[in-house]
Image (tube, helix red, strand yellow):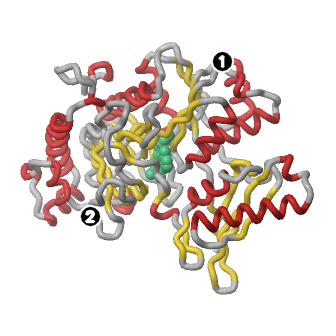
Amino acid sequence: MESPSQARNPDGLSRDHLPAEQLAALQVQRLRQTVQWACDRVPLYRQRLAAAGVAPDEIRSLDDLARLPFVTKEDLRGAYPFGLFAVPLDQVARLHASSGTTGKQVLVPYTRADLDVWTEAMFRVLTWFGIRPGDVIHNAYGYGLFTGGLGFHYGVEALGATVIPASGGNTDRQITVLQDFGATVVCCTPSFFLHMADRAQQMGVDLRALRLRAGVFGAEPWSEEMRDRIQQAAGIEAFDIYGLAEIVGPGVAAECAAHQGLHVLEDHFYPEVVDPASGRSVPDGQPGELVLTTLSKQALPMLRYRTGDMTAFCPGVCPCGRTLRRIRRISHRSDDLFIVHGVNVFPAQIEAALLAVKGTLPHYQIVLSHERDQDQAEVQVEITPEMFSDRIGVLEELQGRLTRAIRQAVGVQLGVRLVEPRTLARSEGKARRVIDQR
Ligand code: DLL
C-alpha cells in the first residue's frame, strides 16, 4: 500500500484528478484482483460466482461488474462473526462493527494494509474540507467499535493537523473543550452538533465567537435546511461525509468546497446506483440504491454490496476540478421509509419541510402508531422559546403552517404536535428520528 503522501500517479496527478481512462484502467485492474482474492479465500463468493458462471479472469472491463451477484447485509449477518473474512485472524490488525441500528451488528476486520487505505481516504477528504497542518480538529465521533472516532483520528494525524479525541457524550465538557482548546474544525453527527449548540447557548457560550470555522458531519441523514441551521448557529461551513463500516467507515465519499454532491473515492470504492427492485443501474440524476465494491481491501472484500442508502449520481463535472464521480447527499435508507395512507414518506423530507418554517427548532421526532385500522404518523417538533410564550392563536397559526408545509413536501397530511424547547430526547451519536409504536 502506498502511503497517503504518495497517493499520486507517476505523472504527478493526484488520485482525485485522474483522467477518466486512467481511472477506469486502475479500477479494472483492482477489480480483477479483488474478485480473484475474494474467490480464492471466501467460500460464499466462490459459490456465488460459480453459480453466476463468472470466473475472476473474465473480468476485463467495468461493465463485467454487472455479471456479479449482489451481497447484502443479510449475507453479512448470516456469516456473523467471521464467515466472510478473507484473511486468518492473525492477519487482522483491528476489528470494528457497524452500528447495528437496523438489526444485528456486523463485524468488520482490517489488515494493516486496509487501515492504510482507510487513512489515505480520510487524509484525502480532510484536505477537501480545507484542513491543513496547523488546524485543530475536535473529534466528537464516538471512539470504539463505531468507525467514526478512529477513522477521523488517524486521518487527521496522517495529515499533520492536531486531533482532540473528544469522543461522544458529556456535552458540557465538550463545550468547555471547544472553547478552551481552540478547535478550528469540529466533527460529529449533525444531530449531536445541534444538541451541543443548544447546550452552549444555555451555558452562555457563543459558538460564533470561537475559532471554529468548519464542521464535518455525517453518519446519519440530514437536509440542506439542517445545514443552514448548523451554519447559522455556529458561524461555520458544514461539510457532508459519508461512509459505512462494511466498506471501510467514514471516507467513502465526501463533499468538496463546491457543496454540489459528495465525491466518491472511486479508486478504492466503486459505486453503482441501481433500481432497488430490478437491481439494474439507473441513469445519472435518477434516484436509486447505492451499491459499492471495494477495490483495494483485503480482510473484508465487498463485491457489489447493497448499502440500502438512497442517492443518485450527480450529472456533469464538479467546478472543483476533481474527476471523481459525485453522489447526491443520502436522502434516506431504503428501510427508513414508512407508508402513511398509502404514501411513501421518509424522515428527511419531513425535516426539510419543518426547518423551512420559522419558529421551529431543529429537534423533532416522528411517532408511528396504528389506530382505527390505519397507520398514523405524528410529527413532534420543538419550537423556539419566543414562540412558546406567545398567545394560543400564534401557536395554532404555526401548527397550521407546519401541517401545510409537510403536506406539500410528502403529499399527505400528518399530525403535528408542537412541544416545548428541550423536551425531546437528544442523541449523543446517531439520532433516532422515528419512534415506531405499531
Ligand atoms: O456511520 C460511518 C461514518 C462515521 C460516516 C462518521 C460518516 C461519519 P455505520 O455506523 O456503519 O458507519 O453506519 C453507516 O450510516 O449506511 C448510512 O445509512 C448512514 N450514513 C453514514 N453517513 C451518512 C451521511 C458510519 N453523510 C450508515 N448521510 C450508512 C446520510 C449516512 N447517511
Which residue occupies the foreground of this view, 190 or 97?
190
Quadrant of the image containing the C terminus: bottom right
Residue placed most toward the observer, 133 or 69: 133
In x, y percent, where is residue 120?
35, 28
Q: Name the disc covering residue 20, or none.
A: none
Q: Position of residue 326 (x, y in %)?
A: 36, 43
In this rendering, the label closer to the viewer, 1 or 2:
2
Q: Is residue 370 above or below residue 292?
A: below
State the residue at coordinates (65%, 41%): 229
The disc, 1 or 2, on the residue closer to the chain's N-terminal end is 1
Position of 357 relative to 155 (above/below): below
Q: Where on the picture, by quarter, is residue 34?
A: top left
- Tag 1, which secondary structure? loop
Occupied quadrant, residue 408: bottom right
Image quarter of residue 265:
top left
Respond yes or no on whether mark 2 lies under 8 Å from ligand 1.
no
- Alpha-carbon neighbours of circle 2 within 10 Å: few (<14), some, or many (≥20)? few
| Residues at marks 1 and 2, CA–CA distance in whole angstroms | 50 Å
Residue tagged by mark 1?
181
Query: Percent from the top left, x then y, of residue 275?
Result: 33, 64
Which three-letter amino acid code belongs to the residue tagged 1? Phe
Specify whether 55 is left or right of 306. Answer: left
Residue shown at the point (81%, 31%) measured from the top left:
203
Whether pointer 1 and pointer 2 mark residues with C-beta atoms closer than 8 Å, the reply is no
Q: Nearer the viewer, residue 174 or 86?
A: 174
User: Up-down: is 336 above or below 198?
Assistant: below
In the orientation shown, which residue stands out farthest toward the bottom? 373
91 and 362: which is toward the camera: 362
* Residue 237 seen in render: yes
From what the image shows, is residue 230 above or below residue 381?
Answer: above
Q: Which residue is mark 2?
A: 280
